[in-house]
Image: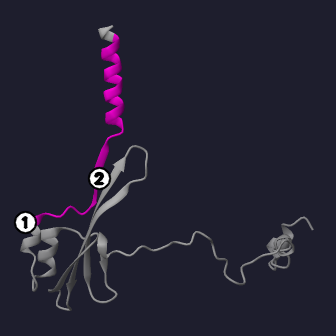
Amino acid sequence: MQRILLIVLLLYLSSLTSCSTVVENRGYIFNPETQEKISRGMDRSEILSLMGTPSTISETTGLKYYYISNKFLKYAFLNPQEIERTVQVISFDKNENVTDIEEYSLKDGKIIKYNSESTIPKGTEVTIIQDLFDNTGRYTSSEAIAGSIF
């Protein structure tokens, strides 16, 4: 009887651990000591040696480095839920010196509703008749005509 009770207890405990909650870190892992060392006026090479390669780089409105970190909560088979996001943006001037340091969190983000429908641009809609006769009149070289069955 004790043996059966032990097996049932082990099965129950193993089922509990398989559905445990896991916190998953993704992206750049921020180091508080490194964060304190960053200041305006630093050179771009100093930032790279201190923080490493950025998650992404933007050059549209001047050179900016983006360091992005996310934390997700995973539970069993359910979709992961983002619980924390940190984005640090370091802006550089033309001399490649730090001009601005900005930090954004999950609260600063905006939800974008994606439209899953596809839009067919005008002029690309093809009817069945156009599809059947699509290649008619396209063969103009003598090799294409000689190789056909006509």
Q: In the image, which residues are magenta?
A: 4-33
Q: Which mark is residue 52?
A: none
- Disc nearer the start of the sequence (2/1): 2
* Residue drawn where x is 31% and y is 85% of the image: 59
Q: Position of residue 81 (x, y in %)?
A: 37, 57
Q: Which quadrant, please, contains the C terminus? A: bottom right
x then y, percent, for residue 40: 10, 84
Q: Position of residue 30 (x, y in %)?
A: 17, 64
Which of pointers 2 and 1 indicates the residue nearer the eye? 2
What's the amino acid at mark 1? Answer: Glu
Disc 2 residue type (three-letter): Glu
What is the spatial separation of the Cα atoms under label 2 and label 1, in whole angstroms? 22 Å
Give left or right: position of 49 versus 15: left
**In the figure, 118 relative to 74: above or below?**
below
Few, some or many C-alpha atoms within 10 Å of disc 1 (few <14, some 14-19, many ≥20)? few
Q: Magenta includes 6?
A: yes
Horizontally, is 131 left or right of 20 in the view? right
Q: Secondary structure at mark 2?
A: strand
As drawn, is 56 to the left or to the right of 52?
Answer: right
* Residue 72 versus residue 38 in the image, above or below: above
Tag 1 residue: 33
* Residue 83 lies in the magenta-colored region: no
Q: Residue at x 78, y 76 (%)?
A: 126
Residue under label 2, please give it: 24
Image quarter for residue 47?
Answer: bottom left
The residue nearer to you, when weighing 31 against 64, is 31
Rendering coords of residue 62 (x, y %): 28, 89
